[in-house]
Structure formats: structure tokens, C-alpha cells
Amino acid sequence: MNELSVLFKNNREWSDQMTRMNGNFFTKLANQQRPKYLWIGCSDSRVPANELVGLLPGEVFVHRNVANMVIHTDFNCLSVIQYAVEVLKIKDIIVCGHYGCGGVHEAIENSSQGLINNWLRHLRDIKFTHDAFFDTISDPEVRNDRLCELNIIKQVKNICRTTTVEMAWKEGVPLTVHGWIYNIHNGLLQDLDVSVNSLDSIKSVTDRAVGQVYQRKDKIEVCSAA
Ligand code: CO
């Protein structure tokens, strides 16, 4: 059996297992998806959206790209947000980054990786914005951790400023944008306390969250479950 046929074997076993647990599982899902959450995460293979929050197929609408970014000219991501808010009526959008993000590392190093350097330029721009803060940190790991956090806050702000979310709020639709970070060392999520639920609060909430990041001078905990 070659490597790829193992995947088909695994798939059949998974399908059987899901059907044993709930005979109608696929029939129900085939008729309609009703996910409650939109997850915008990194493409990193160690950060699988459904698994780490214990959700089954049908429960979370997912968009992933390198370094979990929401760029105002990326019609792929913007279409996902529009469909999630206007068609699926999702009320919670989560942008979830992670410590140890390769995209963040490459952006800080500015190493030559080809086409992707253009994508990572957005991350370098975030770093440039906070250069005075980064100049105070000498440890490269701490710099990476802080840019991972600041990137998430920036992406929360970008989501809030999409035409879809602006319009939803102007029409009084209840909608909250959250920023979370995943620790690849212990499998735990942390809320960055940057949840925004109105146009009026974008600046105050994201400025406060940036202030909290500026207070953190240490490396992230790698083994604690706290
Ligand atoms: Co990543």
C-alpha cells in the first residue's frame, strides 16, 4: 500500500466510525451546514481548526492561509467572511494565530523564500509599525512571540474594517470578532482579550490589547496548562 492509499483507507475507517456513532451524521450534514463560528487560522499543519476546539464537521467554517492574515484585496478571504456573515449568519469570527508561526519567523528574518515574501510583507509592515517596541527586545524568540500576538490584533482590526463587517454592524447585526492564540508547545488556546462587537469600540479595544502585548517582556510559557 503506498502512502496516499493509506489516506483512503483511513478515510473509510473514519466514515464508518462516524456512521457508527451517529447513523444520520452524513445525511444531516449533506442537507445543510449550520456552523456557529468562522475560524481564520494559519495554514500550519500543527494548528487544525476543528480538532483543537473539539468540533465536528459542520460546526466551524474555516479559512486558513499563511500567518492567518486578512488582507483587504484578498477576495478569497473576503468572500469567506461575506458568506459567513451574510449567508450562514455566523455571529462569532475568530482569528487564531499561533506561537512558533513560521510566517512570522520568516517575516522577521526577511529571508528570501520566493513569492511568499510578498505575502509576508504585510507582517513586516506590522513589525515596522511597532519598531520602537521591538528595538527594546533582544531575544529573537520573544520578538517572534510578540509579533505573533500583534499580528492577531492587527487582523482583528482588519476584519472589523471589511465592508461586510462594517455593514453588518451599521445594520445592527450582532457580530463579535475575537483574537486568539494557540500554543503549539502545550496545545492550549489563549484569548488575547481583543473581542470587538461594534464600530465604535474597534480602536479602544485593539489599542488596549496592543498595550497589553507591550507589557509582556517574557517568553511564553511552554509547559504550563494555566
Ligand atoms: Co503559522
Image (spheres, rainbow, N blue to C red):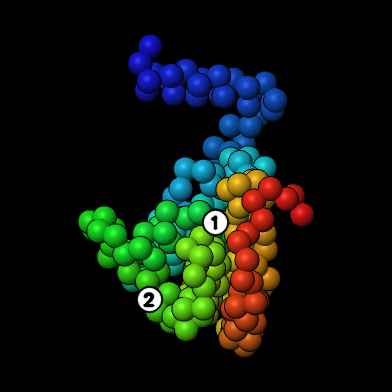
Query: Mark number for residue 35?
Result: none
Q: Amino acid at mark 2?
A: Asp
Left of 225 or right of it: where is 82? Answer: left
Viewer-closest of 58 and 191: 191
Q: Is residue 146 visible?
A: yes
Measured Cα–Cα span from mark 1 to mark 2: 19 Å
Question: Residue 192 appears in which quarter of the rendering?
Answer: bottom right
Is 67 rendered above or below residue 31? below
What residue is pinned by disc 2? 125
Depth order, front residue of 63/120: 120
The image position of residue 25, as x and y in percent, is 63, 32
Q: Residue at x 54, y 68 (%)?
A: 146
Give percent across and percent down for residue 201: 64, 84
For residue 78, side relative to residue 87 (left or right): left
Residue 24 appears at what percent x and percent y? 65, 29
Above or below 16: residue 192: below
For this orientation, the residue located farthest to the top is 1
* Residue 101 horizontal/vertical position (percent): 47, 55
The residue sitting at 61% across, 71% down in the picture is: 217
What secondary structure is found at the residue carrying circle 1? loop
Q: Is residue 144 above or below residue 3?
A: below
Q: Earlier in the sequence, mark 1 or mark 2?
A: 1
Name the residue at the front extreme: 138
Numbered mark located on residue 99 in the image: 1
For mark 2, does the 10 Å Cα neighbourhood hold few (<14), some (14 to 19), or many (20 or more) residues?
A: few
Circle 2 — which element?
Answer: helix
Q: Is residue 81 visible?
A: no
Give the quadrant of the N terminus: top left
- Residue depicted at 51% across the width and 43% down the height: 46
**Whether residue 147 is situated above or below residue 161 in the rendered picture:** above
